[in-house]
């Protein structure tokens, strides 16, 4: 089978677990439209009820930011709000192809305007984003190898085909049965989650001997997630391909200490490098960055929740992504090479009874709420993670970036 068809089938089967008659929305850039079309064709082959392709264009976003002001940037069309509501009410599946071919386009755009546009879009699509985060409908984020991304990862002379060779083992497309390989990997991550839940962790501490000393509280009865999620009808799906993480939602008010970010990332479509944060009583009270400090400040100012943690994820240093030694410039891949934290909204499913809670109830239970969610990679080969239970008993979970439980 052609590698693109095989990849598409993994996304539709292991990713969103598309059922016969289900409708599907695919968000992509202009450069990945061909692959989005292939996904749609394969979806129809599998009995999809309807397929819609939605193009996101950073070039248009840049032009808008350059030419519009104030209230113009706060406009969000009613038809997009209706579309979001319809996707939720009809339980569409949702696939997003990471915009790796246009990641550089907004780097010089006005930070204030990008912030306004991001907030407006988040508000307009709130009903959809809330349903995705509560796993009410199946969703999946993937990336598509292209020439621009290949050059960013492998060098100026690299081709998309060369990038494919790097990604095949990461995506488990080098296996005889990739779908079965993802099923087996999913169960490995689920077993790790069960082990962490059995420990009844009250707090975690991250240290690395190079400045990071971060304490995070974990709400009582928190669920650890990884290897996929379950829909209300019991079907399993996998929000990210690839995925190597196990994660939970920390107590939004119990983060203390200092942490360095170990990998560059995109914040509001702008590259940020060498970031660091200092937390007190759950909030970022100081921050900095070698590159992109201004845009980082704009992100933190979006709402109060942007200054607080919504996720902590543990990733073993032996993952195929980590073993590649590559910086992919895609949060989808880079977050799965390194333990990470996320500023912004937490996952209601991690909180006992969280899927049925209001936002106020979630905050009272310790789960952060926000319009945004961005992962920051804080783990590396020197990272140690210690868990503590209510009695103060300490257990080493990770040593030098590797699980020891």
Image: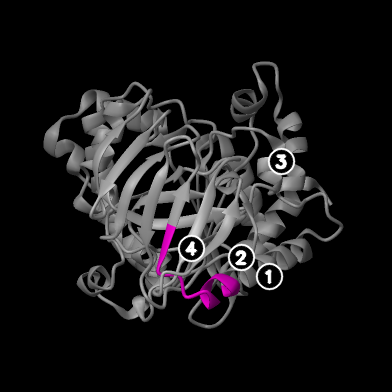
Residue 76: percent from left, percent from top: 24, 48
Residue 169: percent from left, percent from top: 77, 46
Q: Which residue is under mark 3?
A: 323
* Residue 132, quarter of the rendered image: bottom left
Mark 3 Cα within 10 Å, few/some/many (few <14, many 20+)?
Answer: few
Mark 2 Cα within 10 Å, few/some/many (few <14, many 20+)?
Answer: many
Mark 1 Cα within 10 Å, few/some/many (few <14, many 20+)?
Answer: some
Residue at the image position 25 percent from the left and 60 percent from the top: 253
Q: Are marks 1 and 4 in contact (CB under 8 Å)?
A: no
Residue at the image position 38 percent from the left and 79 percent from the top: 352
Sequence-wise, which precedes: disc 1 or disc 3?
Answer: 1
Q: Are marks 2 and 1 in contact (CB under 8 Å)?
A: yes
What SS does tag 1 mark? helix
Residue 237: percent from left, percent from top: 58, 68
Q: In this orientation, does residue 64 appear?
A: no
Mark 4 Cα within 10 Å, few/some/many (few <14, many 20+)?
Answer: many
Distance from Cα at disc 2 to Cα at disc 1? 7 Å
Q: Which residues are magenta?
A: 194-204
Q: Nearer the viewer, residue 219 or 337?
A: 219
Q: Which mark is residue 124?
A: none
Q: Quadrant of the C terminus?
A: bottom right
Q: Which residue is under mark 1?
A: 187
Q: Are marks 1 and 3 in contact (CB under 8 Å)?
A: no
Above or below residue 317? Residue 351 is below
Instruction: Inspect the magenta stretch and tell me whether residue 262 lies in it.
Output: no
Distance from Cα at disc 4 to Cα at disc 2? 21 Å
What SS does tag 4 mark? strand
Above or below residue 138? Residue 314 is above
Sequence-wise, which precedes: disc 1 or disc 4?
Answer: 1
Q: Nearer the viewer, mark 3 or mark 2?
A: 3
Judged left or right of residue 190, residue 103 is: left
Q: Nearer the viewer, residue 252 or 109?
A: 252
């Amino acid at each position: 089978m052609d590698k693109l068809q095989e990849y598409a089938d993994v996304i539709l089967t292991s990713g969103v677990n598309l059922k016969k008659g289900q409708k599907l929305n695919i968000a992509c850039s202009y450069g990945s439209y061909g692959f989005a079309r292939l996904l749609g064709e394969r979806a129809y082959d599998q009995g999809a009820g309807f397929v819609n392709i939605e193009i996101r264009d950073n070039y248009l976003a840049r032009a808008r930011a350059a030419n519009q002001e104030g209230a113009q940037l706060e406009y969000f069309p009613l038809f997009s709000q209706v579309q979001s509501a319809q996707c939720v009410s009809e339980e569409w599946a949702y696939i997003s192809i990471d915009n790796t071919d246009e990641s550089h386009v907004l780097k010089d755009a006005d930070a204030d305007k990008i912030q306004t546009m991001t907030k407006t879009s988040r508000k307009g699509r709130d009903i959809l984003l809330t349903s995705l985060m509560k796993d009410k409908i199946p969703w999946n984020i993937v990336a598509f190898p292209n020439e621009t991304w290949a050059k960013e990862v492998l060098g100026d002379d690299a081709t998309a085909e060369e990038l494919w060779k790097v990604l095949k083992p990461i995506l488990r497309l080098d296996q005889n049965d990739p779908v079965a390989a993802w099923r087996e990997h999913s169960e490995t991550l689920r077993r790790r989650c069960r082990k962490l839940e059995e420990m009844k962790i009250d707090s975690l501490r991250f240290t690395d001997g190079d400045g990071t000393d971060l304490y995070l509280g974990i709400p009582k009865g928190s669920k650890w997630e990884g290897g996929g999620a379950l829909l209300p009808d019991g079907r399993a799906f996998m929000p990210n391909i690839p995925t190597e993480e196990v994660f939970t939602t920390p107590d939004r008010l119990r983060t203390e200490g200092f942490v360095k970010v170990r990998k560059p990332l995109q914040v509001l479509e702008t590259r940020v490098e060498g970031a660091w944060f200092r937390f007190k009583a759950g909030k970022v009270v100081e921050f900095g960055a070698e590159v992109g400090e201004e845009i980082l400040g704009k992100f933190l100012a979006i709402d109060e929740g942007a200054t607080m943690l919504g996720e902590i994820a543990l990733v073993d240093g032996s993952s195929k992504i980590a073993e590649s030694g590559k910086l992919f410039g895609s949060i989808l891949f880079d977050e799965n090479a390194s333990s990470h934290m996320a500023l912004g909204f937490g996952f209601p499913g991690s909180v006992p009874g969280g899927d049925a809670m209001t936002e106020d109830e979630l905050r009272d239970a310790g789960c952060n709420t926000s319009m945004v969610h961005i992962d920051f990679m804080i783990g590396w080969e020197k990272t140690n993670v210690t868990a503590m239970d209510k009695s103060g008993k300490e257990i080493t979970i990770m040593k030098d970036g590797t699980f020891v439980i």
